[in-house]
Structures are given as structure tokens and as C-alpha cells.
Image (tube, rainbow, N blue to C red):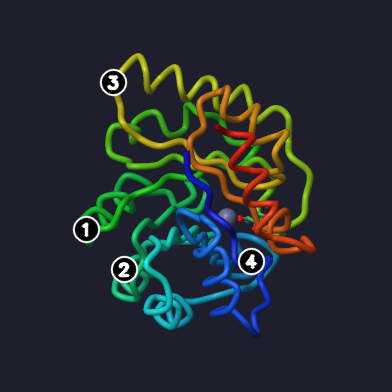
Amino acid sequence: MKIAPSILSADFANLQRDIEFVEKHGADYIHVDVMDGQFVPNITFGPNVVKAIRPITKLPLDVHLMIVDPERYIHDFAVAGADIIGVHVEATPHIHRAIQMIKAENVKAEVVLNPGTPVDSIKHVLSMVDQVLVMTVNPGFGGQSFIEESLDKIHELAALREEHGYHFDIQVDGGIVPETAKRCKEAGVNVFVAGSYIYDAEQPEKQIQLLKEAIQ
Ligand code: DX5
Ligand code: ZN
């Protein structure tokens, strides 16, 4: 079970402090939300920010690309220090090629599904990926509510993994709090992204602890 705090909800003027804090309190990955104002309505970080935060943490950088034609930037994010790169199946007509490109950089490859996108759309790349991210909100912003229907998709994905003997991790992202995390875990999830639940809290270290207890 892994916790991946999303720095989308961190204080951008104090990224180093906020990354070191979650590392010290038991985070497993740092989740970096890259948004281009086109695939999603919001704009965030580019490869330069990944490069800047790379030396300040030992944790793997889990880079979630919410950008159109992500192939254009895979190399740049890999060079900047990403350990996992996630591409949305909706963001490119060539998801297979995009995953091949990530693997060619010796970075872990992840495919991502929006809430409205069926599991079937990624069936033919499941043997290639290290992680599948099932979005549990519509991407773009932190602090939204968990979409219940996502649980059916997680079950479906976990069944395919079992049936074919695949080894990918299943990650969820959006609206994750102890109660939703617990249900996702029961459905087959082992990597949990949480942004506002951790960073918007009075005592973030306590929230990390509560999340960990919920998924034990
Ligand atoms: C949403 C991002 C998430 C976001 C989650 O587009 O992909 O990583 O930070 O935020 P919370 O945990 O607040 O729903
Ligand atoms: Zn994300």
C-alpha cells in the first residue's frame, strides 16, 4: 500500500518545505500533476519544476501528465527526473506508442483513465504498463468529490489483472479520504493519491496517518 501526496494542493511558494514534510511523515511517492490548460482547464508545472524538486527528495516522482499529445514531453520529463510517467488514453490517438516511449526512457509507464472512459479502451496496453491510474474525479482541480462509479472500473481492472497475470499497480486519484480509500483498497487499489485531504489540513501528518490506517 502506497500513499502519494499530490503537490497540486501544496503551497507553491514553499514546495521544498511541503515535499520534505510529507516525506518525513511517511509518504511513498510525490505525485506531480502536470496540466496544460487544454486537456484540462488548469495550468500547473512543466519539466523545469520536476527538475527543481528532484534533488530535494529521495521519493519517486510520480508524474501525472494531463496534457494533449503527451509524446511531445515524455523525454523532457524523463530527463528532469520523473520515476513514473502517466499518460491519459484520451490525450493521444497513439497510447501504445506513448507507453513505448516512456519505457524507452527507462521510466515506469502508467496509463490513465478519465471517469467517463471505459476500461476496455486500455485493454490492449495492460500487459505493457507498471501502473494504471483510475481517475476518481474529473481531472483539473483538487478538492472534488469521489465519483462512486469508479469502483466498478477498479473491480473490472483488478479482474483483468488476475485473469491475465499482469503485475501493474492500481492507483486512484481524486476525492481520496480514509473512507473512499478503504473502499478502493477493497476493490483492488494499492496506490492512493491525496491532495487536499493532506495539504489543506491543520495537521497534515495526522491525515497521512489516518489514511495509512484506513488502507492497512
Ligand atoms: C486532479 C489531480 C489530482 C488532485 C487530487 O486533476 O490529478 O492529483 O491533486 O486532489 P484531491 O486529493 O484534493 O481530490
Ligand atoms: Zn493527479
The amino acid sitting under disc 2 is Ala
Residue at which label 2 appears: 78
Question: Between disc 4 and disc 3, whose residue precedes?
Answer: 4
Q: Residue at x 35, y 65 (%)?
A: 74
Dot 2 beta carbon under 8 Å from ligand 2: no
Q: Residues within 10 Å of mark 2 (few under 14, many from 20)?
A: many
Residue at which label 1 appears: 106
Q: From what the image shows, is residue 57 above or below residue 181?
A: below
SS at mark 3 in the image = loop
Q: Tell which quarter ligand 1 is in.
A: bottom right
Dot 1 beta carbon under 8 Å from ligand 2: no
Residue at which label 3 appears: 165
Q: From what the image shows, is residue 170 above or below residue 92?
A: above
Q: Residue at x 58, y 57 (%)?
A: 5
Q: Tell me, for residue 139, which label it has, or none.
A: none
User: Distance between the Cα atoms at labels 3 and 1?
Assistant: 22 Å
Circles 2 and 1, Cβ within 8 Å, touching? The answer is yes
* Image location of residue 66, percent across then percent down: 54, 59
The amino acid sitting under disc 4 is Leu
Question: Between disc 3 and disc 1, whose residue precedes?
Answer: 1
Q: Residues within 10 Å of mark 3 (few under 14, many from 20)?
A: few
User: Distance between the Cα atoms at labels 1 and 4?
Assistant: 25 Å
SS at mark 2 in the image = helix
Q: Quadrant of residue 11?
A: bottom right
Q: Quadrant of residue 75?
A: bottom left
Residue at which label 4 appears: 8
Circles 3 and 2, Cβ within 8 Å, touching? The answer is no
Q: Residues within 10 Å of mark 1 (few under 14, many from 20)?
A: few
